[in-house]
Amino acid sequence: MAIFFGSGSQVTVKNDGGLYLTRQATYTGSSKHGAIPLISFEAKRRHAGHHRAAGEEEKYSDALLGQELAELLGQAMANINELGKLADQEALLLTIHGTHLRLVVARFTAAYLSHIKSNTIPESEQLWVRRSSPFQLKDRKGREDALRMVIGVLEYIRSGNSEIGLIQAALSYQGL
């Protein structure tokens, strides 16, 4: 996925996969899915960003947050293209570093997205990115909590309340 910025520079984001919307498979028998994920997945080795011992708490890393943000922005921009108009967008990313799973969510306002292809983003435009606490997948409790979180995210997407372009487009197509 490539994003063009106002300066003419291009940033390419490579996604490790995701959860995709399958369209009309019930009616056509098609098993094809879209190219834009509803949720992106990102996997990193345990030492991504810095070296840490097994069991050591992950430290903040500008580089990792930057990559997560790039994936979230790419997802939001792709959904805007699918929707065919500027609208507020949520982007979701499940990221795993070693044995820690985390949910990262960003909400991009239509105003913020309108400035992406310009040379500057006004200071008045803010981007809120939320990251869950990490779920330790080595522990049974961590795996159970991670599963509850993933089920909750899937239910949220299915509810139609999410601001994800593909879902918005599907609901408007069905007249909902």
Image (tube, grey):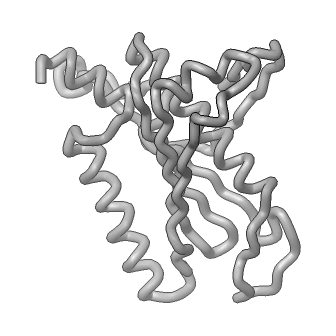
Q: Which image quarter: residue 136? A: bottom right
Visible residue check, residue 35: no
Visible residue check, residue 91: yes
Is residue 8 placed above or below 47 in the rendered structure?
above
Picture residue at 70% right of the left edge, 88% below the top = 55
Which image quadrant: the N terminus?
top right
Q: Which image quarter: residue 96? A: bottom right
- In percent of width and height, residue 78 lies at 52, 23
- In percent of width and height, residue 74 lies at 60, 31
Is residue 26 placed above or below 55 in the rendered structure?
above
How many callouts does the rendering have? 0
Residue extending farthest front: 124
On screen, residue 52 versus residue 83, left or right, reads right
On screen, residue 167 versus residue 67, left or right, reads left
Picture residue at 60% right of the left edge, 73% below the top = 100
Is residue 34 placed above or below 66 in the rendered structure?
above
Picture residue at 55% right of the left edge, 29% below the top = 112
- In percent of width and height, residue 70 lies at 68, 39
Comparing 95 with 88, the one in front is: 88
On screen, residue 135 versus residue 32, left or right, reads right
Residue extending farthest right: 51
Comparing 15 with 59, the one in front is: 59
Which image quadrant: the C terminus?
top left
- In percent of width and height, residue 11 lies at 77, 27
Residue extending farthest left: 176
Picture residue at 76% right of the left edge, 18% below the top = 119
